[in-house]
Image: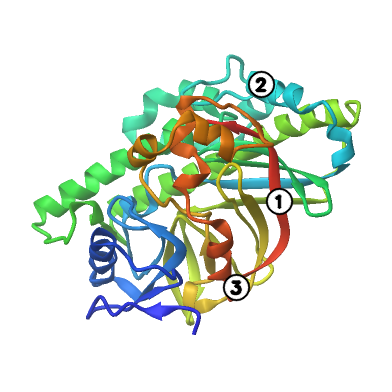
Amino acid sequence: MPYKDLELSQQNPVLSWANHDLSHDETRMARNVASLPFVFKHVALMPDVHLGKGALVGSVIATKDAIMPAAVGVDIGCGMAAIKMPYGSDRLEGKLKKIRQDIEAQIPVGFNQNKEVEKSVTNWQGWRDFKELHSGVQRLDGKAMKQLGSLGGGNHFIELCLDTEDRVWLMLHSGSRNIGNQLAQCHMKTGKELARLADIKLPDRDLAYFVAGTPEFAAYWRDLQWAQKYARFNRDVMMARFKRIVEKHLGGGKQTKPLLSVNCHHNYAEKEVHFDEEIYVTRKGAVRAREEDYGIIPGSMGAKSFIVKGKGNHDSYCSCSHGAGRLMSRSKAKKQFTLEDVIEQTKGVECRKDAGIIDEIPGAYKPIDEVMKQQSDLVEVVATLKQVICVKG
């Protein structure tokens, strides 16, 4: 059997695809989630599992008639997009730095936003429903519009990669920016307040939940779906810009048709049918991997990434890992590694090489090959990529 039952909870089993033991805090977090009465069948942990807030990052939580905002997290709809271009590596000769500079000039990173709003953004249909969102974000419509088509910070990135056949791929990682974060915070606050008023005993305050059929559940579900659409479109807007930059440098500005396009969430919740029952599936740092679903599993900057196709494994609720997963916290990475280490570990990659990205150094992540080995029953590899340009958020 590729997974093991960790035997942590009397209430619901915890099945783990990770080949390492969980730490004390990770074990407690898994047990807390599995002990909740509305959890369906079992909790599934992916090979890249690590500490999160309330629930582990790299966990798939199926629930009946309830949902936990903190299990989805604050970067609602965070995920990956990738497209395969009809170019070979020979066209990149001497152009990497210029492409990177154009990306940095045209796609805002960190807390930055677009100075001007492009037509595809103002025409996005999601704005029609903005007035329906939580009252706590109504003043943020202008900011949400200017941030649509921006990367954000942390572990978000834009990469130009080559596959094993020397074909060019464009790949990026981003989510729902400030608006998704603010919506999540508003609903998490409501959930905690409801639990306090109803005197609900929770193993962790961050596991406050909404029950289906209540106005609070309906409001969260509506805002969640909106933020997930915003996140997906955010990736589309950036990818279109990225594609135009690459076409300018590699194809003389001529528009091309991608050979394959993938856009997938890895922090989200959806209604799905598993084991013949309709349930809510929350993937916190996990990608949907039904049969024929394409997914993206990135390594760290300086490591390989994978385009995969799902195998539809129902024990994992048709899911797989969302990356390599952190081996150590950001603060620990900053203490352990130096700028020299960054330069060494990102050899051959056109990217920033400064102290500001020490926490994102490849050594702070689990080895991606190990992670892939542990989920051979969940996905098959379609393409193996290696980045040659990396722009960090």
Q: Amino acid at mark 1?
A: Leu
Given residues 332 and 9, the one toward you in this image is: 332
Crowd around label 2: few <14 · some 14–19 · many ≥20 (10 Å)? some
Location of residue 166 in the rendering, given as x and y in whole percent from the top left corner: 83, 48
State which tag comes first along the sequence, 2 or 1: 2
Say which of marks 2 and 1 sits in front. 1
Q: Which residue is mark 1?
A: 385
Location of residue 175 in the rendering, given as x and y in whole percent from the top left corner: 51, 40
State which tag comes first along the sequence, 3 or 1: 3
- The residue at the point 90 percent across, 31 percent down is 251
Visible in this render: residue 343? Answer: yes
Q: Which residue is mark 2?
A: 106
Per the rendering, the mark at residue 376 is 3
Above or below — where is 259 with respect to 278? above
Crowd around label 1: few <14 · some 14–19 · many ≥20 (10 Å)? many
Above or below — where is 73 with respect to 249? below
- The residue at the point 44 percent across, 32 percent down is 338
Q: Is residue 78 left or right of residue 94?
A: left
Q: Amino acid at mark 3?
A: Ser
Proximity of marks 3 and 1: CB atoms separated by less than 8 Å: no
Above or below — where is 277 with respect to 241? below
Say which of marks 2 and 3 sits in front. 3
Q: Secondary structure at mark 1?
A: strand
Looking at the image, the residue that sits furthest to the bottom is 1
**What distance separates the C-alpha of mark 2 from that of mark 1?**
24 Å
Per the rendering, the mark at residue 22 is none
- The image quarter in which residue 149 lies: top right
Location of residue 387 in the rendering, given as x and y in whole percent from the top left corner: 68, 42
State which tag comes first along the sequence, 2 or 3: 2
